[in-house]
Amino acid sequence: MPLQLRTTTLTAAETSDGIRIYTKDVDGFARELCNNTTTRTLAEGVKANNDGVPSLLSYTALAFPCSIDSALCSFAWASWSLSVFYQDARDVLRERRHLNSWETTDFVQHGAMRGTNIAAVHSPDAAQIMLFYQDNDGYIRYRTAKNLVWNKYSVPLVKAALATGIGATAWNNLGEIRLYYQDGENVVREYRGNLDGKWSLTAFNKKYAHSIGNITAVSWSNGQATEIRLYIQDETNNITELCHSGNDWYIGALKVCM
């Protein structure tokens, strides 16, 4: 998102032990918070309208330096395996990974725009990963990994508005991938693709008068169709929800005023 709008940097991932949140301090250090209340317990509390469900956050020992303008992106797989992507002080994209312990991997991506937004999709076992970012020329690019080994080169996909939000979601083991971004005419677009590198622009479009902020996408199966939820930080910094349940897009009930 435009750097002047990024007042808070955070990302979250769900493990079998609870939720892990990664945020960035003003000193340029990324840190980890843990919430050991499982999402199932939280969901049951919400359904029961129980305000007493514990949701306690605490910092862990994990802390590592990153660019003061860095975005963060994380995901989890298996029982307690995680990856966190960030830009270092030289604006190089890097990855911290937890398998048995936290390590900086050999993932190195030069040429990323300073403060680029970052999005990732992966198969359930992380055997396939695709990472999206924006380069210095304004192109959204992606880089893939197989069995946690990264391909050497990234692939340019589409030119977007500078500092565009980037949202991505996938299903069917990355057989279906959706990428969301804002183009140079301030229209939020959707690309449909897959691991074979076949991409096409869909009919989805959402026009804005100005540059917007973050874009986040999630998806799941309802047994009959794939549900997609798109969350957009609009020009006024409010967060709105767009929904797709197998047919047309519609406006969701969620609206968060910032």
Image (spheres, rainbow, N blue to C red):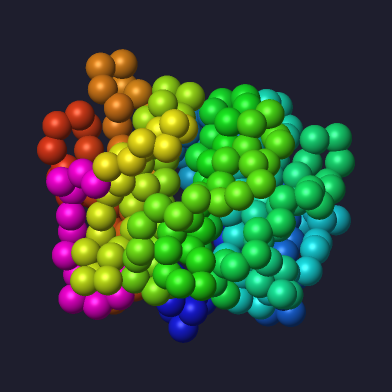
Whether residue 257 can be seen here: no
45 above or below 191?
A: above
Residue at horizontal 54 percent and vertical 35 percent from the top:
122
Residue 149 sits in quarter:
top right
Residue at horizontal 17 percent and vertical 65 percent from the top:
207
Tell me: 47 left or right of 99.
left
Tell me: 83 left or right of 214.
right
| Residue 145 position in % (x across, y down) | 62, 37
**Image quarter (top left, top right, bottom left or bottom right) of the N terminus:** bottom left
171 above or below 105?
A: above
Q: As rendered, which of 186 and 220 lies closer to the eye?
A: 186
| Residue 76 position in % (x across, y down) | 63, 37
Tell me: 191 left or right of 80.
left
Q: As rendered, which of 186 and 239 lies closer to the eye?
A: 186
Q: Check if residue 206 falls in the magenta segment.
A: yes
Residue at horizontal 41 percent and vertical 26 percent from the top:
175
Q: As rendered, which of 84 and 33 lies closer to the eye?
A: 84
Q: Which residues are magenta?
A: 201-216
Residue at horizontal 42 percent and vertical 37 percent from the top:
197
Whether residue 174 can be seen here: yes
Most extreme residue toward the bottom is 4
**Image quarter (top left, top right, bottom left or bottom right) of the C terminus:** bottom left
| Residue 241 position in % (x across, y down) | 27, 52
